[in-house]
């Protein structure tokens, strides 16, 4: 069993004004029946209201704390703007308390600063990238993730995602320089079932050990094979080898190369 090194955190309590309690529905719908399996329980936690837009243009801010967030794999930073407002943002990998950052069209190429994609040099790595102008960052928000800028062309910036996909985004969308914090998150070994229950995950039962009435894989004597040609869900829907992306989705034209 392993865990993340929390030495980079400042160890202060979260800022109360930016916290709220999210109700746990345990995977149940309005009728009280389970609509999403394997959810429920877990440790109590408070949601930190993050600012993914950072739209206070040309207002410098100072990093006050680097904190843990129970709702995400990355660490977060509490910032204090020059006008006195505080907010939480995603922390970059080398960000530390006392650093100064700014959102500006002419921001310097310092990690944590936020600027238009067209003003960031080719080859740079960015995170919290906007896909739709003004909507806030949507790409590269999990621990250790980043997007590489490949080219600027005719109003669009070509981005290489961590999945290998290459897609276009408007070059007047905002992005933050650097890589998301906690890059070693993917090396965690959970180690025991009880720790998974603390994350709010309930037990998962294999289909092949069920009865025929409960799953397409069920029935048979001993350790039998799947018994169906294609992998299926509990409800008989094909789950492997079928493309699920809508062919009419408007953003298909923005994808230059699909992920492998």
Image (spheres, rainbow, N blue to C red):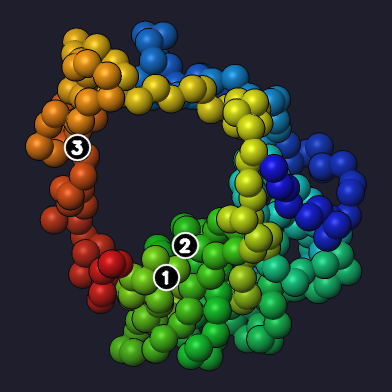
- How many angstroms separate mark 1 from mark 2 (CA)? 8 Å
Q: Which one is in front, 187 or 80?
A: 187
Separation (CA) of disc 3 from disc 1: 28 Å
Do residues under tags 2 and 3 come within 8 Å of each other at their CB atoms? no
> SS class of the residue under badge 3?
loop
Expressed as whole percent of the image width and height from the top left, the position of residue 121 reads: 53, 91
Q: Is residue 170 left or right of residue 180?
A: left
**Looking at the figure, which quarter contains the N terminus?**
top right
Specify which label sits upstream in the sequence, 1 or 2: 2
Residue picked out by circle 3: 231
Q: Secondary structure at mark 2?
A: strand
Tag 1 and tag 2, C-beta contact below 8 Å:
yes
Instruction: Name the quarter where the C terminus is drawn.
Output: bottom left
Residue wearing tag 1: 161
Tell me the residue at 19%/10% (across/down). Answer: 213
Callout in the foreground (3, 1) = 3
Does 99 appear above or below 68?
below
């Amino acid at each position: 069993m392993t865990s993340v090194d929390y030495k980079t955190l400042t160890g202060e309590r979260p800022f109360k004004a930016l916290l709220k309690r999210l109700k746990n529905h345990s995977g149940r719908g309005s009728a009280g029946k389970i609509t999403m399996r394997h959810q429920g329980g877990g440790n109590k936690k408070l949601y930190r209201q993050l600012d993914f837009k950072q739209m206070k243009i040309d207002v410098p801010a100072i990093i006050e704390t680097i904190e843990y967030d129970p709702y995400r794999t990355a660490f977060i930073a509490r910032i204090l703007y020059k006008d006195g407002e505080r907010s939480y943002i995603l922390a970059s990998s080398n960000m530390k308390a006392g650093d100064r950052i700014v959102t500006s069209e002419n921001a310097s190429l310092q990690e944590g600063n936020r600027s238009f994609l067209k003003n960031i040099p080719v080859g740079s790595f960015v995170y919290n990238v906007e896909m739709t102008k003004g909507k806030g960052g949507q790409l590269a928000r999990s621990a250790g993730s980043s997007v590489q800028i490949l080219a600027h062309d005719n109003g669009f910036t070509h981005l290489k995602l961590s999945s290998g996909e290459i897609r276009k985004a408007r070059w007047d969308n905002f992005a933050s320089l650097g890589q998301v914090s906690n890059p070693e998150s993917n090396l965690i070994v959970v180690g025991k079932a009880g720790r998974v229950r603390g994350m709010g995950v309930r037990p998962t039962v294999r289909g092949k050990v069920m009865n025929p009435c409960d799953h397409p894989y069920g029935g048979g004597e001993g350790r039998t094979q799947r018994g169906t040609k294609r992998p299926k869900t509990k409800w008989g829907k094909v789950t492997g080898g079928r493309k699920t992306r809508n062919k009419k989705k408007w953003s298909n034209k923005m994808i230059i190369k699909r992920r492998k």
